[in-house]
Amino acid sequence: MFKKTLLTKTATIWGITSLITLLIWNFPVLSQDQKSSDNQSDSLADVTPDRRRGGASRRIQNTQERTNKNETVEAPQRRKPAAGRPNDNYCDFDPQKLTALIPRNLVSTTVNPQPTLLFFIPGIAKGTDLELVLRSPNDELIYKKEFQSKGQRGIMNLQLPPLISVSPQVNATPYHWYLSVICNHSDRAYDIVVEGLIKPVSLNPTLAEKIAQATPTEQIKLYQDYNLWNETLNLLVSLKRSRPQDPTVIGLWEKLLESVDLDQTIAQQPLLNP
């Protein structure tokens, strides 16, 4: 009996010691995993070649599943979709051509309370339905707009509804948006989808003063220095509309798209009417 009790105590002590040792050895690994999770939005672009383009969509989540999960916005899937499914793509265009004009990490930073997104739209048949969806940082549906393609090829702009204002002391959580081309109304799994995140930030007073005193081309440089993608892109589009033959503007436009590894043929596409 004494030997049995001794063996039991020894096994218990050994088990506790092993558990503590296991926790100590694994603690740095858990910490590293947490760091990896924190940096996920910055590194997602390296996982797949390019997710700013269109392609076969993900199947829409069940509404009850969304309700049960109190999830915040996660990094999206793509700025270009994957290749469409053979014989099942009811949209008569190359899904890889549909492109969101956003950085490779899919995050657009803006100080505009009602920002505008830009997309390269390929030759989508006139009358094809499209849908723009915006979800809050808590994954709540806050905006959905359906509209029809005009059958034009070029760069299209879509304005989002007003976002929550951000004070200098608050780090904003990005909003998650989707643009879908609806190829089959009876099965939305065949939508061609591009998506991304837009992050509202406050405008630094010093930067605001510099911008007010700068020329348009100087403003572009300031926006780039402060990583304000949305302002940079939209100011360049505005300049392209007013000065379409200006070589300086054309050069800045081409360099901007090249800086985020977007197809340079997009720089040659016409700007569609708002």
Image: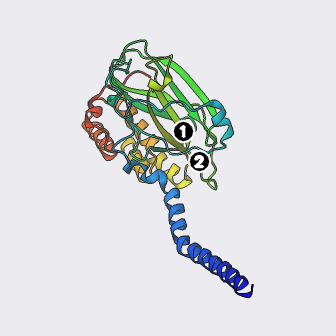
At label 1, counting other C-alpha atoms closer than 10 Å, the crowd grade (few under 14, some 14-19, many 20 or more) is many
In the image, taking residue 7 as reference, residue 76 lies left or right, namely left
**Residue at position x 29%, y 34% from top?**
267
Q: Position of residue 4 (x, y in %)?
A: 70, 82
**Residue at position x 53%, y 20% from top?**
146
Indicate the colouring scheme: rainbow
In the image, taking residue 179 as reference, residue 101 lies left or right, namely left
Q: Find the residue positioned furthest to the top.
A: 127
Give me the disc on residue 173. Answer: 2
Q: Position of residue 31 (x, y in %)?
A: 54, 67
Q: In the figure, 129 relative to 134: above or below? A: above
Q: Position of residue 129 (x, y in %)?
A: 47, 17
Q: What residue type is labelled 1?
A: His
At label 2, counting other C-alpha atoms closer than 10 Å, the crowd grade (few under 14, some 14-19, many 20 or more) is some
Could you tell me which secondary element the residue under label 1 belongs to? strand
From this viewpoint, is residue 5 visible?
yes
Q: Quadrant of residue 162?
A: top right
Looking at the picture, tell me which residue is in the foreground, 155 or 180.
Answer: 180
**Residue at position x 74%, y 87% from top?**
2
Q: In the figure, 140 relative to 180: above or below? A: below
Which residue position holds label 1?
A: 176
How many callouts does the rendering have? 2
Could you tell me which secondary element the residue under label 2 belongs to? loop
Looking at the picture, tell me which residue is in the foreground, 266 or 105.
Answer: 105
**Residue at position x 37%, y 14% from top?**
125
From this viewpoint, is residue 226 visible?
no
